[in-house]
Amino acid sequence: MVKFIPWERILARLVEEQKIIPALAEVLQGIYQAGSARWSHIARYMSGHHAAAYKRLQRLIARFDPRPVLARLCLDEAPFVLLDPTEIPRPQARKTPYVGRLPEGTRGFWLLVLATPFRGRALPCGWLTYSSATIAEESTSQPLELRRLLEPLRALLQGRPLVADRGFHDRKFFAWLQQGGIPFIIRVKMRPRPLKLYDEAGNPLHPVLQPGESRAWLQVRHHELTGLTLIGYWKQGHSQPLWLLTTWPDPNQALKWYLQRMKIEESFRDIKSLLGVTENMNRQRLWMERTMGLVLLAYAMGYLAGELLRDLAWGNESPPKRIEDWHKPQQPRRAWYRYSGLFTLLRAKPPLSRAQRQRWRRLLSQLPVLFPHPLVQTHV
């Protein structure tokens, strides 16, 4: 079904430089056909001789930055924004400068993705990469890398909480978010060394939970940070509780949003297993990062195309007018629950008639109009 996607018509509404659209459409199609982010694999599915196709891919990546395009896919109606890293192992890359050591000791780097939740998955709208090697070389740190990612997208975060897992509980990062007016819901570690927290009266806070219990401590102070809320949640059957630190005023809603964080984990699984993001072998960091951006863009476009396909095949056939109106069908068939949009596009074989397939392609060409930040062409 990927071959039926009108990539050029979709990209015409998202990419400002119209001259690169044919080459970009060919590369996105090649990523899906190859199931890999490795340049030599993608070039096999591009037109012409393999060496010429490889050169065209190289010129495109040197010229095109996917960041502005992905930023246009950020959903204004999403209640929260997800932030999560995933490991990209590179065990054989002994001489690649940007490859460092992962926590398990293997070689690799981190892909940090900013995304908005949508229909059981997450749509990426920003990314960066870092490793122990790049942090040491650039005299930076993980909190500074986080600020580098979030600073250009600060306007998109206003009024919506940033939801993140463990590994981001840095007080300087918390202070930067609080000073910038960005609410956050971040999981923190309380074992083996608990955070130094104080209640409103300045007394040390020693939170205790029982299995099956959920509780919130308001007006908590952590170093120079004030007005925080500590949330504890111990699900029955789990060995230890979940602890969240947040500035969101409603603790129950904050906990509910955090428990939906698995959406981005499911997206990472799709990107790794279906699009082969771990197979990227670039030696230059700039080319590697832009290749990662192309894979994320291909994932977003393919996932939305698959969602339309899933609705047409097993749900209702009424297309949405706006992205925020794109909800679950009222009476979907059983197969609608079985597959995600991307799996429907790549692996499932939905029973579509020729007329339905033509309608699907027409809907795909209008897909960017549903988003709040499409490219508006003036033709002056």
Image (spheres, helix red, strand yellow):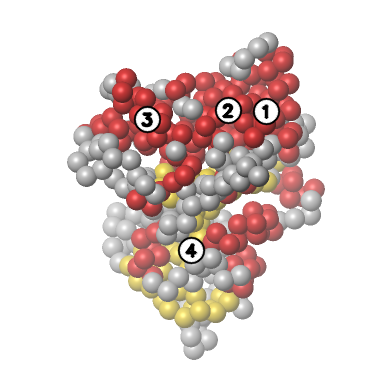
* Side of 238 relative to 280 (left or right): left
- What amino acid is found at the position of numbered circle 1 in the picture? Met
* Side of 238 relative to 224 (left or right): left
Task: Give the spatial CA distance, label 1 vs label 4.
Answer: 35 Å
The answer to whether mark 1 and mark 4 are in CB contact below 8 A is no
Residue at 49% in and 75% down: 228
Task: Give the spatial CA distance, label 4 vs label 2.
Answer: 34 Å
Q: Earlier in the sequence, mark 1 or mark 4?
A: 4
* Side of 36 relative to 261 (left or right): right
**Which residue is disc 1 drawn over?**
281
Q: Secondary structure at mark 3?
A: helix
Residue at 26% in and 32% down: 314
- What amino acid is found at the position of numbered circle 4 in the picture? Pro
Q: Earlier in the sequence, mark 3 or mark 4?
A: 4
Total numbered badges shown on the rendered structure = 4
Q: Nearer the viewer, mark 3 or mark 1?
A: 3
Task: Give the spatial CA distance, label 3 vs label 4.
Answer: 35 Å
**Which residue is disc 2 drawn over?**
25
Q: Position of residue 155 (x, y in %)?
A: 58, 62
